Amino acid sequence: MEWVKVLGIAAVLVCMTLYEWPRMKRQMKKEKTAFAALTVLGGILACLLVFYPETPGPTQCIDAMYKPLVNVVEKWTMERSE
C-alpha cells in the first residue's frame, strides 16, 4: 500500500514540474536549479514520511538543538534578576 502512496507523490511532483518548468524563462538557470533541488528534496522527505511516519518533524529537531541554549539563557536571566 505504501508504494501506491509513493506513486501518488511521484505523480504530484511530475505534475508540478510539468506546470512550472515551461513558465520559467530560459535564462532562469538558478531558479530552475533551486526548483529542481527543492522538488527532489521534498519528494524524498515525503517518501521517507510514508515509510517512517514516526520520524520527528523539523520543529522537534529545532527544539532538540536549542533546548540546551534555552536552559543556559533561563539560568543566566534568573541569576541577573536576583
Image: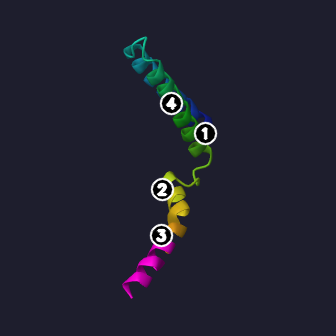
- Identify the magenta region: 72-82
Q: Is residue 47 visible?
A: yes
* 79 inside magenta stretch: yes
* Real-space Cα separation, disc 4 to disc 2, in angstroms: 21 Å
* Residue 42 placement, left or right of 20: right
Q: Position of residue 34 (x, y in %)?
A: 48, 28
Which residue is tagged 2? 59
Which residue is tagged 3? 70
Q: Does the CB distance between marks 1 and 4 fall below 8 Å? A: no
61 up-or-down from 13: above or below = below
Outermost residue, top side? 26
Q: Residue at x 56, y 55 (%)?
A: 56
* Residue 19 placement, left or right of 2: left
Which residue is tagged 1? 2
78 up-or-down from 63: above or below = below
Q: Does the CB distance between marks 2 and 3 fall below 8 Å? A: no
Q: Nearer the viewer, residue 15 or 37?
A: 37
Amino acid type indicated by mark 1 = Glu
Amino acid type indicated by mark 3 = Val
Q: Earlier in the sequence, mark 2 or mark 1?
A: 1
Q: Earlier in the sequence, mark 3 or mark 4?
A: 4
Secondary structure category for the residue under label 4: helix
Q: Earlier in the sequence, mark 2 or mark 3?
A: 2
82 up-or-down from 3: above or below = below
* 39 inside magenta stretch: no
Q: Residues within 10 Å of mark 4 (few under 14, many from 20)?
A: some
3 up-or-down from 58: above or below = above
Which residue is tagged 4? 39
* Image quadrant containing the N terminus: top right
* Real-space Cα separation, disc 3 to disc 1, in angstroms: 39 Å
Q: Does the CB distance between marks 3 and 1 fall below 8 Å? A: no
